[in-house]
Amino acid sequence: MYILHITTEAAPFAKVGGLGDVVTALSLEMVKKGHQIALLLPKYDCMDTSLLKNLKAESDSFLTEEAGQKYRNTIWTADYKGLKILLLETDHPLAYFSRKTIYGCKDDNDRFLYFCKAALTYLTNAQKTIDLLHLHDWPTAVIPILYREIYKSQGLNIKRTIFTIHNIDYQGRCSILNLNKIGINKETYFRDLLDPVFPGVINLMKGAIKYADALTTVSPAYEKEIKTAMGGKGLHYLLIENQHKLKGILNGIDTDYWNPEKDLFIAAHFSPNDPIQKIQEAKQKNKAALNKQLNLADSKAPLVVSITRLVPQKGPELIRHALLKTIEKGGQFVLLGNCAPDEIQKSFEEIQRLFAKNRHLAISYQYNEPLSHLIYAAADMIIIPSIFEPCGLTQMIAMHYGTVPLVRHTGGLGDTVFDVDTSKENEELRNGFTFEHPDNKGVDWALDRALDCYQNNQEKWQWIMQHGLKEDFSWEKSAAKYMKVYSGI
Ligand code: ADP
């Protein structure tokens, strides 16, 4: 089967969050099963092309029309671990993909609408037959409409289209003018895409839900949540109407990449199958390396961490509370949080000023892949107090590195973390601490029990660690479920 992903992220060379991890890991699993997989994404100036092999420009360039003007584009090809990578470069005067960032520009709608149109122009010229086109979140949501409206009649042959909702919070709201610019002018589309909440606004995700052949989302719990008024953010009626083509499939992690046995970024290696004492010794060495790197006190205190986009969805005020509580109780806290809006970053900077001389706390606002690996390997516990969480990968990566998750019971976190004291699941599945309400009391309930267990009941602590370490987070099971969706079963 020839499967093409049109995507705005692919880990590790163009990643902002979990979407990038999922696209690459799912694709690599499909390659193992003998399928031919390609990823088509913009050639961002900020992407790390050193990770790609055989990168070269195709000789034929092509034109894409936007608002009556034609702009030249070039496709670059490369290989990444058996995946074919196609990168779209454009001579557009607004330098759409040379902004030193993937998202966060005022004209993101125009940038990604243009990308979608140029991608389909390229595929049409290349006379490709695509068995399965897999699209991800709002930036590629216009593609099913563009295909129907313009490219199908020009000979592009796409047999089946799948749209995955990674996060329904970002729906791609824009205006009719944005659609006009890329040549979508029909009243029917404007009516179909009208935002259910904001009058007169166009909602791109709505179009993909309506026009894709199949829909997936990233966990069974999130599938249920997005069909409720609370979780659907205005799109719940449409999702209920289309539930026959919607399936929640839990994400996995790329266990070749996230592998504590050979991770290049950590100080001491271990296998999840090693005896627990050996794992704890290795984690202690990683902790010493991390403490040195971050200028923290060398300490046997429990290390609580957070690795996250520091945005409202992730409960930044609850992370702040967990941080203060950990320090108060004599623990250490490391926060690696990127994408923070100003007011959120300021509230953490205030804490940094208050604790300027305290060597039990380190906060960094960067996106730092190598540092994130060392933190997972060094930490005792990770706090994930999300307000909502479609799937969440950090809890799975953490468990695979012997770090115990403390999570709010929501979305995919509820599908993967089972409370050691209160869960109704079998004992061998209980792998962390959970809480229900997204408030300080909820955080305290999980954090107090975890710190107490770590300090006073090491036997139980090791038991929890082992349950996480033993779990199979690989993509194998989930990829088989995707295969069924791909095949229309
Ligand atoms: P989301 O996609 O909502 O950001 P996920 O839990 O699904 O959340 O995926 C987050 C991914 O991004 C994980 O691979 C995590 O390790 C990584 N990540 C998050 N924040 C950072 C950061 N500041 N630096 C490096 N990696 C990060």
Image (tube, rainbow, N blue to C red):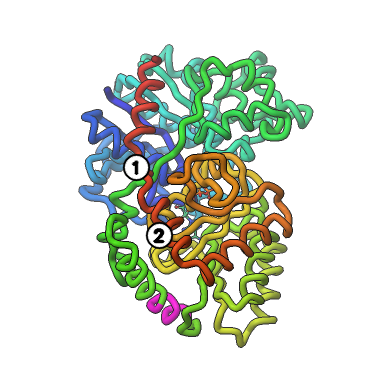
First-in-chain label (1 vs 2): 2
Q: What residue type is labelled 2?
A: Gly
Residue highlighted by disc 2: 402
On screen, 69 above or below 258? Answer: above
Residue 89 visible in rendering: no
Where does residue 182 sit, x and y in percent of width and height? 55, 28
Q: What stretch is highlighted in magenta?
A: 288-294
Q: Is 286 on the left-hand or right-hand side of 445?
A: left
Residue 397 visible in rendering: yes
Q: Nearer the viewer, residue 164 or 178?
A: 164
Q: Distance between the residues labelled 1 and 2?
A: 16 Å
Residue highlighted by disc 1: 474
Q: Which amino acid does label 1 sit on?
A: Ser
Q: How crowded is mark 1: few (under 14 residues within 10 Å), some or many (20 or more)?
A: some
Foreground tag (1 vs 2): 2
Secondary element at image label 1? loop
Q: Which of 255 and 372 is in front in this view?
A: 255
Q: Quadrant of the C terminus?
A: top left
Magenta region, mostly helix, strand or loop? helix
Q: Which residue is drawn at 51% across and 77% down?
A: 301
On screen, 367 above or below 187? Answer: below
Q: Which residue is drawn at 25% across and 34% down?
A: 31
Where does residue 469 sit, x and y in percent of width and height? 37, 53
Q: Is 136 on the left-hand or right-hand side of 269?
A: right
Q: Residues within 10 Å of mark 2 (few under 14, many from 20)?
A: many
